[in-house]
Image (tube, rainbow, N blue to C red):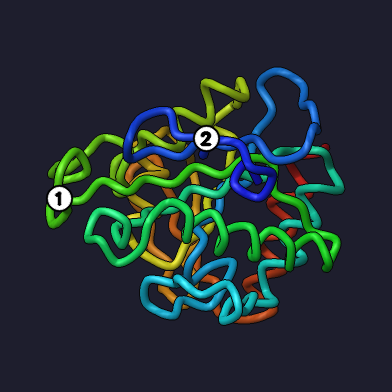
């Protein structure tokens, strides 16, 4: 990550981190696998701020690996209100996120882009913004990734552990998402699918594999 090699953080504005990871290039109009981070990729320890405490949730590893295998981008979109609230800064976020990516790399699972939004109504200074368009459940981070990577958002998939993740996906034009430890639901133009067990994971992996056919 930029922080680890001594360069400025990849902030496009005070509360938005947009980082390309690695050098993989994808065809125009590729779908993507969008993932929330805390509670989805790694165990949510309530505003994670210690890289040494990061623990991956194993169920996401085969999903990320499947996306890597068929050649579609893996994009992390994460709300980070702890920065706005003053619990930690972007340097701490960089260290924690670097640890997440390192642990994934060790398991042969690779992320292609990370977007993080620090804006929150409970913040201070320039980060104190209510209902910022980049903060989930708003779709801004997904749309920004779609613009930068020239993605087909309608065919893309979302995995997250909160309804806000599903709402952001629906508002961005995606057709389906998987809710970690949640329940399935059908809404106009959007399907929420549950992700509880290996059977549910099989459905996610089948949907990912179908994007490569």
Residue 34 location (% of width, % of height):
56, 47
Residue appearing at x 66%, y 50% in the figure: 4
Mark 2, residue position: 10
Residue appearing at x 70%, y 39% in the figure: 73
Q: How many labels does the image show?
A: 2
Query: Closer to the N terminus: mark 1 or mark 2?
Result: 2
As helix, strand or loop, the secondary structure at mark 1 comes to loop
Residue 47 is left or right of residue 198, and the answer is left
**Which class describes the residues within 10 Å of circle 2: few (<14), some (14-19), or many (20+)?**
some
User: Quarter holding the C terminus?
Assistant: top right
Vertical relation: 157 (above or below) 198: above
Contact (CB < 8 A) between labels 1 and 2? no
Q: For marks 1 and 2, give the CA distance.
A: 21 Å
Most extreme residue toward the front is 6
Vertical relation: 133 (above or below) 152: below
Task: Give the number of the disc on residue 159.
Answer: none
Query: Residue 185 sits in which quadrant?
Result: bottom left
Residue appearing at x 37%, y 65% in the figure: 162
Residue 19 location (% of width, % of height):
58, 37
Residue 5 location (% of width, % of height):
69, 44
Residue appearing at x 70%, y 18% in the figure: 28
Q: Nearer the viewer, residue 151 or 130?
A: 130
As helix, strand or loop, the secondary structure at mark 2 comes to loop
Residue 23 location (% of width, % of height):
79, 32
Mark 1, residue position: 124
Residue 165 is left or right of residue 205, and the answer is left
**Which class describes the residues within 10 Å of circle 1: few (<14), some (14-19), or many (20+)?**
some
């Amino acid at each position: 990550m930029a922080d680890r090699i001594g360069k400025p953080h990849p902030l496009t504005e005070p509360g938005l981190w947009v980082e390309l990871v690695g050098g993989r290039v994808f065809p125009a109009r590729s779908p993507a696998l969008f993932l929330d981070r805390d509670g989805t990729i790694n165990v949510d320890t309530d505003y994670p701020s210690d890289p040494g405490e990061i623990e991956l949730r194993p169920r996401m590893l085969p999903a990320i690996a499947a996306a890597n295998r068929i050649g579609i981008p893996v994009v992390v979109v994460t709300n980070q209100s702890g920065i706005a609230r003053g619990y930690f800064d972007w340097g701490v976020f960089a260290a924690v996120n670097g640890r997440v990516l390192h642990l994934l790399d060790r398991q042969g699972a690779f992320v292609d882009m990370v977007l993080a939004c620090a804006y929150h109504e409970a913040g201070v200074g320039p980060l104190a913004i209510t209902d910022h368009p980049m903060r989930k459940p708003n779709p801004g981070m997904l749309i920004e990734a779609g613009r930068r990577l020239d993605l087909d958002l309608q065919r893309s998939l979302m995995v997250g552990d909160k309804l806000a993740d599903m709402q952001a996906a629906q508002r961005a034009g995606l057709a389906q998402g998987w809710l970690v430890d949640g329940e399935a639901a059908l809404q106009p133009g959007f399907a929420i699918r549950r992700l509880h067990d290996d059977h549910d994971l099989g459905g996610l992996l089948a949907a990912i594999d179908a994007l490569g056919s």
